[in-house]
Structures are given as C-alpha cells and as structure tokens.
Image (spheres, rainbow, N blue to C red):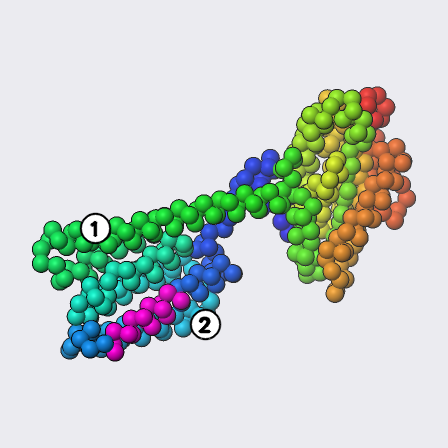
Amino acid sequence: MTGAHTPSTRRDGESTRAAPDPLRAGRGPESALVAGALALLLAVSAVLGSVNLFIDGAVREGAGRPVYAVTLGACLLLAAALGVHRRAGEAATVALVLFGDLVYVVLAWATDDPLRYAPPLMLLFTCLVAAWFLGIRALAVHMVAVVGACWVALADSYPGTAALLVAVTASAGLLNAATFGVFVLRRRVQRLLTATQALSSTDPLTGLANRRSLVDQAPRIWRQARRDGQRVAALVLDLDHFKRLNDTYGHAVGDAVLRGVSGALAASVRPADVLARTGGEELVVLGLVSDPDEVWRLAQRLRLAVVDSECGRQRAVTASIGVALAGPVDGEDPTDALWRLVDRADAAMYEAKQGGRDRVVVAGSLLVPRPQVAGVARRGRGGGGMA
C-alpha cells in the first residue's frame, strides 16, 4: 500500500519526488528500456561496421582485420546478452556507453582511412543513448571521452596538430552539442511528466490523492489484503453543514476549511492508509485492518482530528463518518469491490448524519453515539452554523 497521498506529494501537497529517471530504476520497464536501447546501439554498430569488411582496402591488413572482426563480434554478443536479460543498471549503462566510445576508437584504428570508413559521426549512437539515460556526472565523463576518442581516431589523418585540433573541435563539439541538447530535452520531458502525474493523481485544492489515484491503489490494496489475511476498511468522511458554511462565510473560507481539515486528517491517518478527496467536502480513507475495533479507533481519531483542527476550533467544524469492512474475494475486480465498499461506507455516513452528525457509524451495525470526550462534545453539538 501507499501512504496517505500520491507518491509525488507530501502531506502539505508539495512535490517531493520527480518522475523516475529511466537509468536509476535497476529493474522493471525502465530498466528494460535502457537494456533494449543499448542492445540496439551495439547491434546497429556491429551491422553497419561489418560493411567495411567487404570493402577492399577499408580495413588494415595484418592485425587490423581480426581486431576489427573480434570487436564487432563482442558488440553482437553484448547486444544478445542485453536482449536476453532485459535489464541494465546504472553502472552497467555507464560502462556500456564508454565501451561504445572505445569501440569507435578500435574500429577507427583498424581502418585504413578513418575519415572515409570510421568518421566521428559513428559516435552519434552512443551520444544519443548517453544523453537519454545517463546522469549529469556520467554524461560529463562521456563527453570528455568523445573528445579523446575523436583525437585518437583522427590523429593519423591530419599532418599537423593545428589541423587535428580544428577537426576534433568541430567533430566533438557537434557531437557534444547534440548530446547536451538531447539531455536538456530529456530533463524537460521528465519535468512535464512529473507535473502531469501530479495533476492527474492529486486534488489541487487539498493536495490529497484524488478519485483516480484512489482507484489506481485498489489492486495493490486488495492483493496485500489477500496476502496478509486482513480486511479492507473504507471510511467516508463528510463535513457537517458545509453548504451552510459556504453560504455564510463564502467559498474562500470553505476552501480554507477543507485545506485545514485535510491537513489534520493527513497527520492522523496511519502511514499505510490512502486518504483521498473524492469530491466536494467528502473524503475517503482506505486501509487494512485486522478487526473492527481497529477501524473504529481510527475513525474516532479522525473525527476528533477534525474537531480539534485549527479551523474546527475557530468555526466548530465537525464530520460525520461512515465505516465499512470487506474481505477480499479471489477473482473479484478490485475497482468494483472498492466502490461497493465505499458505497456501503457512504450509506453509513448518511446514517451518522441522520443520527445527529459528528459521529461514527459502522455499516451493518446499530447506530453508535459518539463518545462524550471532554471539551469535544460541547464544540460538536449546537451553537454556530456547523453543529
């Protein structure tokens, strides 16, 4: 299960974690993407490089041809290994990108004329992979390696140091400029993805999870409940007489009350619970419990958290809470089961409203009057527009 909010927000709604960097996930689909890109890089390099083996005079005689062929064979073997394992961690990715730079140097050395048969443009493959998958420090190392690779590969193709320096500056500069440009684009895409994920899963007013995020958590919650032999509890909280509050004090005050109550509830739920705003002044808490007493204590704690919140003390804000429990059944759809459970808790919440508000009702049980806690009963009943 997750915490009370979506992974990209903390309890005050502020972003705390960016979209996952493809390189930093050692497992899962992102790692598979990195492995696939590296396998493609190595395979394409080997296939394109093998063309020189069939061109007369392209590869040096003597040791050049076997070195050239072995290097291409190593690329194909690594590509096959990545395709089979479908995983590449951060260290492996950095090593393979630098290996790609080294491969270019070896191929350039083995050719008779690097400018014709192994131009620096061949490094574009490694540059693009590095730009999309490496962190900033590893990318800087790669960019330095590109300069060194171009220098070594082109050293025999120019008569003087000045001419070589110009050629290396032009080639490496163009490659590194493209690399950095793609890197900046990647970071921009990651920021946009982070913002999009936050908008799609977070309530903009309270910073809590929204209805969609609640649905997204259902499959994992139901799996964990089956695995641990626990029951799923849904608590529906509705602020009492909230429409009267809006009509009396205005929507700005109503929004402030919602934010204040949300903060108080977020500080009171258990770390593994999911707290979401599903619409208007209605909030839902979803969690796992071992017995009804546990969820009853949680519901009472949340009820008191609303009453004792700063806005609750100022305007006598209270909440009616409905509770429902369910044991997961094999084969049921978690989303459908979620809403059936929430509907039962919602019905219990309306029973709490009809029974006098500021109380907890468990679905399927008799109406339970709220405990008379010192200092709380007086604020919860009568008086003011929120009773």
The quarter of the picture where the C terminus appears is top right
**Kind of residue at disc 1:** Thr
Along the polypeptide, which appears first: circle 2 or circle 1? Answer: 2
Per the rendering, the mark at residue 11 is: none
Indicate left or right for 80 with 249 as reference.
left
Q: Is residue 69 visible?
A: yes
Residue 284 horizontal/vertical position (percent)? 73, 43
Label 1: element kind: helix
Indicate left or right for 182 with 175 as reference.
right
Residue at (71%, 51%) from the top-left corner? 288
Q: Which residue is mark 2?
A: 84
Residue at (78%, 22%) from the top-left corner? 248
Closest to the observer, 307 or 24: 24
Q: Main secondary structure of the magenta part?
A: helix
Q: Is residue 48 magenta?
A: yes
Indicate left or right for 193 with 364 as reference.
left
Residue at (68%, 35%) from the top-left corner? 262
Q: Is residue 104 magenta?
A: no
Residue 107 horizontal/vertical position (percent)? 24, 68
Q: Which residue is mark 1?
A: 169
Residue 150 horizontal/vertical position (percent)? 22, 57
Residue 381 horizontal/vertical position (percent)? 85, 26
Label 2: element kind: helix
Dot 2 surroundings within 10 Å: few (below 14), some, or many (20 or more)?
few
Closest to the observer, 260 or 157: 157
Q: Where does the magenta region start and end?
A: 40-54
Q: Is residue 291 visible?
A: no
